[in-house]
Amino acid sequence: MKQLSLNKIGTSLLAGAMLLLLICNLASAQSDELRRTLFKDADTALKTAEDKEAAIYAPATFAAGMNSYKKAEEELQKGEEIKEIQKNIASASDSFSKSAELAQRGTAFFSSVINARNEAKQAEAGQYAEETWKKAESRLGDAIKVLEAANDSSARSKGVEAETAYREAELESIKLQCLGEARALLKKAEESGAKKSAPITFDRSLRVLQKAEKTLDENRRNTEEARNLASQAQYETRHAIYLSQTISRLSTEKKTLEEILLEAEMPLQTIANTLGQTVHFDQGTEPATQEITSAIKGQK
């Protein structure tokens, strides 16, 4: 009997717990349904505003809507009067709808600025031209705020400033990506003394790099030619560094001019020997070069 009584108690407790859980689930479902019903229009307006990027192009109006929306949610959780909750929901819906309209107008108003921004973003200006990109973002933000306040004239002026900054950021980024390594190498060459020791070759590198930069100034989309020129500039720079180092070595070794000239003849002599040719340097290196060239052509 005692065991049976305990079983009955256990069964009763389990039934009570299940009933309580059912009641809680029912209450939660009713609460969720109430929220869906109350916030239906506001949620639709919020989705439309988000699709129009109202947080970006109508920030003040969108923020006002979010404040009312969150306040209504807090009031619902606290069990406040439905009428008070509905007031904030209506305010949120109105603000979201207005922000969507303003955002749609803003994107049309700033279409050329947005296009410039997208192209700068595609060029990774935020990474390679960070300061100029931030300046452009700040100016666009100012322009949007002014337009939201219905000052079209000032908004247009600020929009032009933002567009100019985005274009600058884009070009700056493209140049850094195409010419950055060549610029860094040229700077290294100058710091190592190549500009002074091998001025002709150094200047040749500088001119090629300037040509690459001019190519991008004239057409920032012509990156292939700019990269090719930058590669050529890097070669010339490395050549200048090598010449500078060689000049420094020869100066340290204190070789005579005759020793230097004889050393310069050695590579040609090696090539001639490989080809089985006899060359002479009593008339300089030019005749020997011609003989080697003729021998190579004759073997083809």
Image: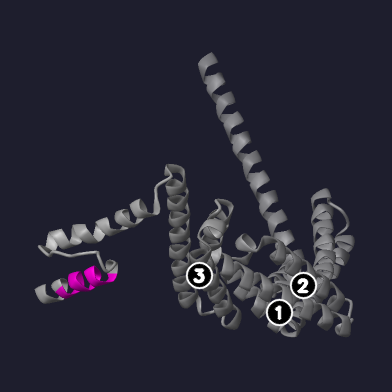
Of residue 204 and residue 155, the one placed in the foreground of this image is 204
Q: Secondary structure at mark 2?
A: helix
- Percent coordinates x, y for residue 170 in the rendering: 63, 72
**Which of the two labelled residues, at mark 3 and mark 2, occupies the earlier sequence position?**
2
Residues packed near mark 1 inside 10 Å, few (<14), some (14 to 19) or many (20 plus): many
Disc 3 residue type? Answer: Arg
Q: Secondary structure at mark 3?
A: helix
Picture layout, residue 27 above or below residue 114 = above
26 inside magenta stretch: no
Callout in the foreground (3, 2): 3
- Disc sitting over residue 140 in the figure: 2
Q: Secondary structure at mark 1?
A: helix
Residue sitting at x 18%, y 72%: 291
Distance between the alpha carbons at the discs numbered 1 and 2: 8 Å
Disc 2 residue type? Answer: Leu
According to the image, label 3 marks what residue?
204
**Magenta stretch: dominant secondary structure:** helix
Q: Which residues are magenta?
A: 286-294
Are the two marked residues, 1 and 2, in contact with CB atoms closer than 8 angstroms? yes
- Disc sitting over residue 113 in the figure: 1
Horizontal side of 19 relative to 55 (left or right) equals left
Disc 1 residue type? Answer: Val
